[in-house]
Image (cartoon, rainbow, N blue to C red):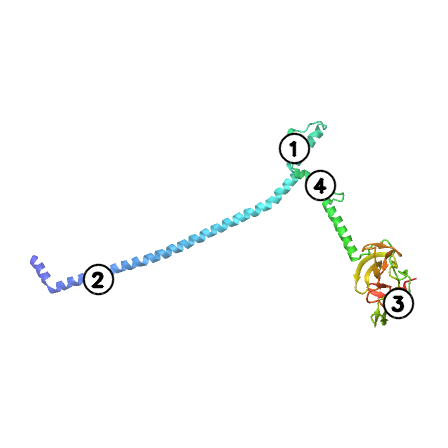
């Protein structure tokens, strides 16, 4: 047997077969090891991707849970707000504790014929009453019968006074204590004298001092300096002023848009706002200004209707 085995091992064919099998086994081992390494490298990536997908799914689930909780909280808040008016209405219907206590005390008093004494709790509540509440009650008691608070009534009076003052500013002769001037009214001469320059707005007239022709919105009445000047009609003094042409002057508002102006005055005793009657002295004739030196001493007298010059001689008696 041993001889046969020795011959077998010594045979070249046998040795070739053995070597071939060893090479095949070694190749198979190498291939198997490579596959294990490749699977080892691929498995971590696959595991990481699976883990990332699982984490994303978990995050989405958590977000949905948080959203659901927020909606529940909002729903509870809305329900609470809807219940608050109902609770307030119920409290209003039931009445405040003080009102309930007062009703109970009144009921007890009525049952005992009004002979029951106030309880200690009632005295403590009265002693601890809120001063602001008492003040509000006093203000309600002090309110006018119309139901408006006193402060609102005073505000209404102030507005009325302001409106009246505004109307007086717009119309300074509102509610004057005299009859308004009109087309049928007449004027009196402010001074007695000859007319030196006539009223003329349609054509020009000659001015001796100026040595020129121009229109004249007034009349110049001859008068010696120092002559008293009378108000031509009753009215209200609205202006006391001075300018270069006619010197010191006084404007009287006679109502209905009629105004009279007397210029070249001195020693004026009236002021703006004074009420004057026809004939009241409103000043004296002054020395003529440089515009009327040649004409001599005179009174500048003009009249307007709604600001438009008119001839005062048409209204003088």
Q: Nearer the viewer, mark 1 or mark 3?
A: 3
Q: Is residue 107 left or right of residue 31?
A: right
Q: CA distance from mark 1 to mark 4?
A: 20 Å
At a point 23% along the width and 60% down the height, the residue shown is 30
Q: Is residue 305 left or right of residue 64?
A: right
Residue closer to the observer: 271 or 316: 271
Residue 200 percent coordinates (x, y): 86, 69
> Quick one: label 4 or label 3, which is nearer the N terminus?
4
Q: Which residue is mark 4?
A: 139
Q: Which residue is mark 3?
A: 196
> Quick one: label 1 or label 4, which is nearer the N terminus?
1
Q: Which residue is mark 1?
A: 127
Q: Nearer the viewer, mark 3 or mark 2?
A: 3
Q: Are marks 1 and 2 in contact (CB under 8 Å)?
A: no
Q: Nearer the viewer, mark 4 or mark 3?
A: 3
Which quarter of the picture shows residue 247?
A: bottom right
Q: Can residue 257 be seen in the rendering of this structure?
A: no
> Quick one: label 1 or label 3, which is nearer the N terminus?
1
Q: What secondary structure is marked by label 3?
A: strand
Q: Is residue 101 left or right of residue 59?
A: right
Q: Which residue is mark 2?
A: 27
Q: What secondary structure is marked by label 4?
A: helix
Q: CA distance from mark 4 to mark 3?
A: 73 Å
């Amino acid at each position: 047997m041993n001889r046969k085995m020795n011959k077998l091992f010594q045979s070249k064919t046998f040795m070739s077969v053995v070597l071939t099998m060893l090479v095949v086994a070694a190749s198979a081992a190498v291939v198997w090891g490579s596959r294990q390494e490749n699977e080892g490298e691929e498995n971590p990536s696959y595991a990481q991707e699976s883990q990332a997908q699982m984490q994303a799914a978990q995050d989405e689930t958590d977000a949905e849970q948080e959203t659901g909780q927020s909606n529940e909280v909002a729903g509870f808040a809305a329900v609470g707000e809807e219940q608050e008016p109902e609770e307030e209405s119920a409290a209003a219907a039931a009445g405040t504790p003080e009102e309930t206590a007062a009703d109970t005390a009144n009921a007890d008093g009525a049952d005992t014929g009004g002979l029951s004494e106030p309880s200690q709790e009632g005295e403590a509540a009265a002693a601890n009453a809120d001063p602001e509440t008492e003040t509000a009650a006093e203000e309600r008691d002090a309110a006018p019968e119309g139901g408006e608070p006193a402060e609102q009534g005073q505000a209404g009076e102030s507005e009325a006074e302001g409106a009246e003052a505004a109307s007086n500013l717009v119309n300074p002769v509102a509610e004057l204590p005299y009859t308004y001037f009109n087309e049928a009214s007449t004027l009196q001469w402010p001074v007695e004298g000859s007319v030196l320059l006539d009223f003329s707005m349609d054509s020009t007239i000659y001015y001796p001092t100026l040595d020129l022709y121009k229109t004249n919105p007034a009349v110049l009445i001859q008068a010696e300096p120092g002559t008293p000047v009378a108000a031509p009609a009753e009215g209200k003094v609205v202006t006391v002023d001075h300018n270069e042409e006619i010197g010191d002057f006084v404007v009287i508002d006679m109502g209905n848009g009629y105004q009279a102006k007397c210029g070249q005055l001195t020693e004026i005793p009236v002021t703006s706002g004074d009420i004057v009657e026809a004939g009241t002295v409103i000043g004296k004739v002054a020395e003529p200004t440089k515009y009327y030196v040649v004409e001599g001493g005179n009174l500048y007298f003009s009249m307007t209707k709604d600001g438009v010059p008119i001839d005062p001689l048409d209204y003088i008696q």
